[in-house]
Amino acid sequence: MVGTIIQAVINGLLIGGIYALVSIGVTLIFGVVKIVNFAQGEFVMIGMYISFFLSTQLGIDPIVSLVVTMPVLFVVGVLVQHFLIRRVLGPNDMPQIFLTFALSLLLLNLSLMLFTANYRTVHTWYSDEAFHFAGLYVPYAKLIAFVVAMALSGCLWVFLRTTDLGKAMRAASQNRDVASLMGINPDRVFAVAFGLALALAGAAGSLLMPFQSAYPFVGQVFVLMAFIAVVLGTLGNVIGALVASLLMGIAESLGIQFVGADSGLLVVFVMFLLTLVFKPNGLGGGKAR
């Protein structure tokens, strides 16, 4: 029984690392730019397709393809911010919501038109390999994805805390007008924040490719989990989103193991509702929005 629980916790932590990359991107955009990006899941899907074609056409390992997917999605994020998001920033949230939702629908239907609804997979040497220890089973592909995801999350935290640009992003997130008076260009900061968020989504897509099929709707589950993690971890709190994502991964895995194969999300939603009832500000505390 204890071994089963430990195995479920390990499985949950491994997938929670991927949830963390997506949710950190969502909370970064919300914390800095003050909008909710409903299209974040579609950029995970784009990252998966980029890794798929790099692997099948050029023989590049999905993990190695991070060096392509992250810069490409970063540039896409900067362009989206400059040409689309920047034009709807303001006190009214509705244009922002409609814009990102429309972008999500556009990307989803474009992928259906270009790639059809077929499932695309990449098989690597480590896709079916696993590390066995004391009766526990740890898949190499998910372990590598978790380690890289945590490393990228740590790099983002260091960037936000120690670099001038990171401090400028935090300042702009707190008060855009005061940041402008201090010589910070909010449009530049917002573009970098959006680019970083989409780069993390692209990284999540590449890390998923060795053990997850790519198809146009694949990002829907991940963006749903990301929104829950963002609320659980307190809106705009990067560390809170990371912790919440890992806890959600564990809750989902335990639900699948002890409740039913289709009950993982049910357990996550129960945890979400209980958190809203007893700690509405989120696990990270702070001001409720």
Image (spheres, rainbow, N blue to C red):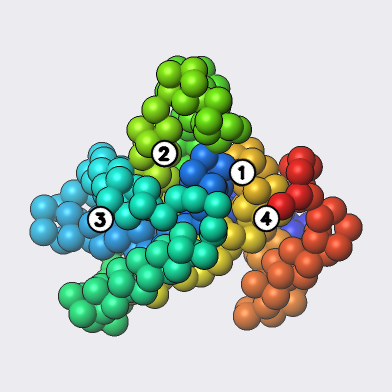
Mark 4 or mark 3, which is nearer the start of the sequence?
3
Residue 232 visible from this viewpoint? yes
Which residue is the site of mark 2? Answer: 190
Q: Do the residues labelled 2 and 1 touch (CB within 8 Å)?
A: no
Distance between the alpha carbons at the discs numbered 2 and 1: 14 Å
Q: Residue at x 32, y 55 (%)?
A: 84
Q: Which residue is drawn at 30% across and 69% down?
A: 107
On screen, residue 218 above or below 236: below
Which quadrant of the view contains residue 218? bottom left
Q: Which amino acid type is marked by label 4? A: Val
Which quadrant of the view contains residue 135? bottom right
Q: Residue at x 70, y 66 (%)?
A: 268
Q: Say left or right for 109 vs 192.
A: left
Q: Do the residues labelled 3 and 1 touch (CB within 8 Å)?
A: no
Which residue is the site of mark 1? Answer: 236
Which residue is the site of mark 4? Answer: 231
Mark 1 or mark 4, which is nearer the start of the sequence?
4
Point out which mark residue 135 bears. Answer: none
Q: How crowded is mark 3: few (under 14 residues within 10 Å), some or many (20 or more)?
A: many
Secondary element at image label 1:
loop
Point out which mark residue 51 bears. Answer: 3
Q: Which amino acid type is marked by label 1? A: Gly
Secondary element at image label 4:
helix
Mark 3 or mark 2, which is nearer the start of the sequence?
3
